[in-house]
Amino acid sequence: MAETIDEISIKYEEDGKLIVEQLDKEVLSKGAWTTIIFKFRQWDNKKDDYGPEKFTIRRYRKLKGEYKQQTKFNISSKDQAEKIVAALQKWI
């Protein structure tokens, strides 16, 4: 588990192979409850390559000095991301 926000990552390795490649992250809010949006790619065994870029928003709660994931929302495609951005721009 991560003790600082900088240590939080969604990078995931299995049997020495990088399954989830974290491309970028932006901290949306800090504190006891922290929200981070990540840009990532996931390994696709069928293609023997990484799939398209995806995005995920995750909330972490700091308990006993460690950040633990509480919730997540996966944005499955660039198209879905663009629709979320468009909706937010319309409302703000």
Image (cartoon, rainbow, N blue to C red):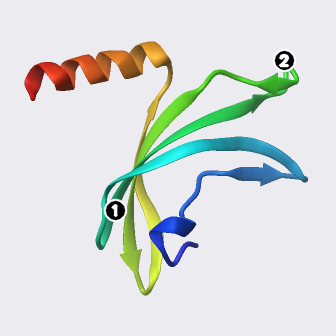
* CB within 8 Å, label 2 to label 1: no
Q: Which residue is disc 2 drawn over?
A: 47
Q: Which mark is residue 34?
A: 1
Q: Quadrant of residue 50?
A: top right
- Quarter of the image with the N terminus in it: bottom right
Going by the picture, which residue comes out furthest to the top?
79
Asked if residue 43 lies left or right of residue 79, the reply is right
In primary-sequence order, the first of circles 2 and 1 is: 1
Q: Which mark is residue 90?
A: none
Of the pair 20 and 25, the residue shown nearer to us: 25
Residue at point 55%, 72% (across, down): 2
- At x 67%, y 51%, the residue is 11
Rendered location of residue 76, percent (x, y): 50, 24
| In this view, 84 is above or below 12 | above
Q: Residue at x 34, y 62 (%)?
A: 34
Q: Please indicate whether residue 51 sits to the left or right of residue 89 in the image.
A: right
Q: Secondary structure at mark 2?
A: loop
The answer to whether residue 61 is above or below residue 37 is: below
Residue at the spot x=66%, y=33% of the render?
A: 41
Kind of element beneath mark 1: strand
- Spatial separation of the CA atoms under disc 2 and disc 1: 35 Å
Q: Residue 8: x and y, percent?
A: 54, 63
Give amino acid for label 1. Answer: Thr
Question: In which image quadrant can residue 87 be found?
Answer: top left
Q: Position of residue 74 (x, y in %)?
A: 46, 34
Amino acid beneath label 2 = Lys
Image position of 83 with respect to 62: above or below: above
Quarter of the image where the C terminus is located: top left
